[in-house]
Amino acid sequence: MLSLPYSKTKRYLTGIDWIIHVLNYMTIKETGADFMSQIAIEVAGAVNADELFNRLNAFIKKYPVLYGYASRDFNLAPYWKIPPVKKADVLFDSVTVENDAPFETFIQYLEEKINTPFKDKRCHLAFHLISSDKKSFIAMRFDHLIFDAANAEAFLDLFQKELKEVTHSDYKAVFEPAHLSLWSEKFMAGQRVNRAFLKIADKVPPRVLPLPAVKNKFIFKILSFDNKDAEAIAENAFNEAGYLMLMPYALAASVYCFHKIFTDRLISSGDYVIPVSINMKKQGEENNRVFFNNVSFFIFKIEADLAENFTGLINSIKEQMYNQVKEDFPGDLCRASMLMRIAPLSLLGRLMKIYLKGQVASFSFSYLGEAVYKSSDFMGQDILNLFHMPRVPVPPGIGIFFQRSNERMNVILSYLDGILINDEAEEILGLIKSRLGVK
């Protein structure tokens, strides 16, 4: 079948990359800031701001891909236009706080940063330091055009390995073919994806929380479990959901707890639809393909009548997951999305809402399993915790994320200011803790 010509020196965007560009476009349009995330590393003691800046600056300048932007080739396929080596310094700022500053002080500063838009289409990365004598937070803020969550951790891990001289990276151009062949395979995948979405679609939209009138700030609530509690959660997941079923267990707990808020709000129309991102890297590729998005998605439809039945929730999620794995829905989504790249972002943003009557999801969810950042320290300082602070695409503007960091587990609730009131957000975290079986 016809295979269109393309350049073998360009990094073409995959279909999933283009979906991320659509989500970025939608989120900027709604909130004024990018679809981005932030990794915050909490370390013991103070961090020298000048040393951190100099080391980061030397490292980042090896990767001109970080300063690229999307463009279209002669064949209309989008690609990542990579400039020559960037000479400008990395975006970096630092602030010092009192030694007895509470955790909320650090989080407020980090919230301010993650809600700050990148002002240049060639800027996708920034670093922030909040330091005291007792502990410090180093944050890497990035947009999802250049990293998914796991790849962002892998990038920081690469930086730490270079500091320890465990490895030395020389920049190698990142290439990706245009995927302008195997058209019948892509069209057949598109038909299967279309049928799957039609099966999820109802006559009424899914249950959603109304978006606030002003959509310019995300709030973050973080629930952190130590190793003992994390192991207890894993054991509870094994007993209630089965071996290696922590993701379905965590998703079931999230639906169970969110349902309480929806019920209290008297939101009773429709079922729940939740996209769940999954890492598509194969085993052994953790430190390869560090840039761009190596993800796909499961899409779960949860009948509202099941939401108070925890065992029923788990069984429904497991059954849907088994079926989507068996039918290779995530793979079909990757293949079918290659066909979408011809369309402009504004059109795709409207098309994504068609199936669910103007909505995209009830809430977002992800479970980032074992930590990709492996070191127990950062620049010689012992790591106390590492957690993510993701802005959620709008809509739905709210999500819950489970993530492991070596011996800890973090649950991050991210939502547009105004979707929840503070008491509701605190209630969700309390319900999650109880539902996971942690006292």
Image (cartoon, helix red, strand yellow):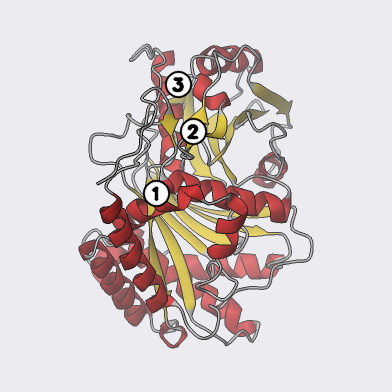
**Quadrant, the C terminus:** bottom left
Depth check, mark 3 against mark 1: the one in front is 1
Q: Does 15 appear above or below 68?
A: below
Residue beneath label 1, please? 338
Label 1: few (<14), some or many (≥20) within 10 Å? many
Label 3: few (<14), some or many (≥20) within 10 Å? many
Residue beneath label 3, please? 159
- For numbered disc 3, what is the local secondary structure? helix
Q: Does 228 appear above or below 154?
A: below
Q: Quadrant of residue 95?
A: top right
Spot occupied by residue 398 in the image (x, y as percentages of width and height): 59, 62
At label 3, the amino acid type is Phe
Spot occupied by residue 215 in the image (x, y as percentages of width and height): 74, 58
Q: Quadrant of residue 425?
A: bottom right
Residue beneath label 2, please? 74
Q: Are marks 2 and 1 in contact (CB under 8 Å)?
A: no
The residue at the point 54 percent across, 29 percent down is 44
Identify the mark at residue 234; answer none if there is no mark.
Answer: none
Q: Does 244 appear above or below 13?
A: below
At label 1, the amino acid type is Met
Spot occupied by residue 351 in the image (x, y as percentages of width and height): 54, 64
User: From where the camera sits, is residue 230 visible?
Assistant: no
Q: Which is nearer the N-term, disc 3 or disc 2?
A: 2
Q: Which is nearer the N-term, disc 3 or disc 1?
A: 3
The residue at the point 36 percent across, 25 percent down is 8
What is the C-alpha distance between the residues marked 3 and 1? 32 Å
Q: Which is nearer the N-term, disc 2 or disc 1?
A: 2
Spot occupied by residue 402 in the image (x, y as percentages of width and height): 44, 54
At label 2, the amino acid type is Phe
